[in-house]
Image: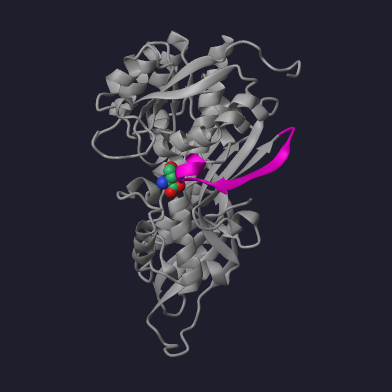
Amino acid sequence: MTEQQNNTTPKQVGIGLVGFGTVGTGVWETIKKNRALISGRSNNLFSVNIIKAAVRDISKKRIEDAPTELFTTDWNEVVNDPAVDIVVELIGGTTTAFDIVAAALKLGKTVVTGNKALLAERGAELFSLSQNHGSAIHFEAAVAGGIPIIKAVQDSYVGNDILSMTGIINGTSNYILERMFDAGLAYPDALQEAQDLGYAESDPTLDVNGWDAAHKAILLAVLAYGSVIDPKDVYVRGIERVTRTDINFAKSLGYNVKLLSVVLKHKDGQIELRTQPSFIPTKHILSSVNGVFNAVAVNGDASGEALFYGRGAGKEPTASSVVADIVDAAHTIASKAPHRGFLPYSDDTKIKPINDTSTPYYVRFDVTDKPGVIADIAQILATDGVGISGTHSPVDPENPDKEFVDMVFLLHTCTFGKLKATLKKVRALDSVNSDPVVFRIENI
Ligand code: HSE
């Protein structure tokens, strides 16, 4: 026995799971497989044991070596069990999950959750309970699955002002966009493929409407800047309306299309926080993030840039993050140290109004091809001071006299508010047939 080893009996830390589906099973298996590693790395200070699990259907066989008495259909039995020190919420949603987490916090118990929607939508109430009852909330699994980005932002960047975090943090959207870009699939077919492969949820709404990524971006910003953020202040667009037409234009212009979440600290202290499908140069490293993988580029004022890349979802990667939180919390409990769950430490995060944010843009107009149409559009852009960096309008060799054509303008950086006002004037032209399609071109 070395001097470093702990001679006392390990403290038995009781874990209660609410939800024992894919991730719950992964947590059980990971703890079982790596128990000795976890104990050794924790100096044998404690032992973590899953002692209770709430499930919807008790008759469903989940795991061979889980005893029947482990399971209950009543989450109250998990939360109120005096031997349960850590409640792991794995059911998702923002209603029952809220009740479970709130009940546990009020009892002074530690909560581990991967529920990004719950914390992004109702974080103010839950962090206040955490503060008032001295109980911790840990949520490594809530952002980017198996990538340890929460601990990195919370702990490893503690000595940095975080200047930006730019990420691809929804694997389902990333898979769909990749298939549209690489295989030329239409959006519905790519979505169907993602569902058939089990990537998209059976209800993929939050994946494709951008909110799953936006919730994660909100949590990153909450950690980096210290105050709870109202989701209503955040700009979110999903991938549902991305078409092959724009993907093909992007490709021909040297860009890829990615659902990008951007967290950017401006010099005036305001935080730009937005999620939308954006054009990024194909040579940029984020363009190579394919399939259901996630990546977050973090830029700290001291550290400089770092890229976190890995599996953003799935049984084992998500379980890895849940287990990391369980072990962190167990360490606190066994050593009677102050907890290390996140608590807000500021109340002055100001989100920059989306109309004040600036990037270059790709804009596609559907126009009637008659003499002067380009000049008319260019005249409005020039009068409003919106610079053009390029134009593009492919000719169909089989029908060079086509009446309706796509007219693409690449525009210099201007505010989103100015762009919208100018495009409204362009839309009023007789030769412009529908609302223009706009993508930001990201300066990353
Ligand atoms: N459904 C998410 C994704 C994972 O596709 O990335 C959980 O947030």
> Which residue does the image show at 41% across and 61% down from the upper left?
242
Percent position of residue 67, x then y: 34, 29
> Which residue does the image show at 58% across and 63% down from the upper left?
255
Question: Which color scheme is applied?
Answer: one colour
Which image quadrant for residue 404? bottom left
Percent position of residue 341, x then y: 53, 20
Magenta-tinted stretch: 301-318
> Which residue does the image show at 50% across and 45% down from the upper left?
312
On the question of residue 102 being in view, the answer is yes
64 to 400, vertically: above or below: above
41 to 147, vertically: above or below: above
Percent position of residue 47, x then y: 53, 21
Residue 394 versus residue 138: which sits nearer the camera? 138
Q: Quadrant of the N terminus?
A: top right
250 to 204, vertically: above or below: below
Residue 44 versus residue 384: which sits nearer the camera? 44
Residue 224 versus residue 424: which sits nearer the camera? 224
On the question of residue 140 being in view, the answer is no
Q: Is residue 432 in the magenta section?
A: no
> Which residue does the image show at 34% across and 14% down from the upper left?
81
Which image quadrant for residue 403? bottom left
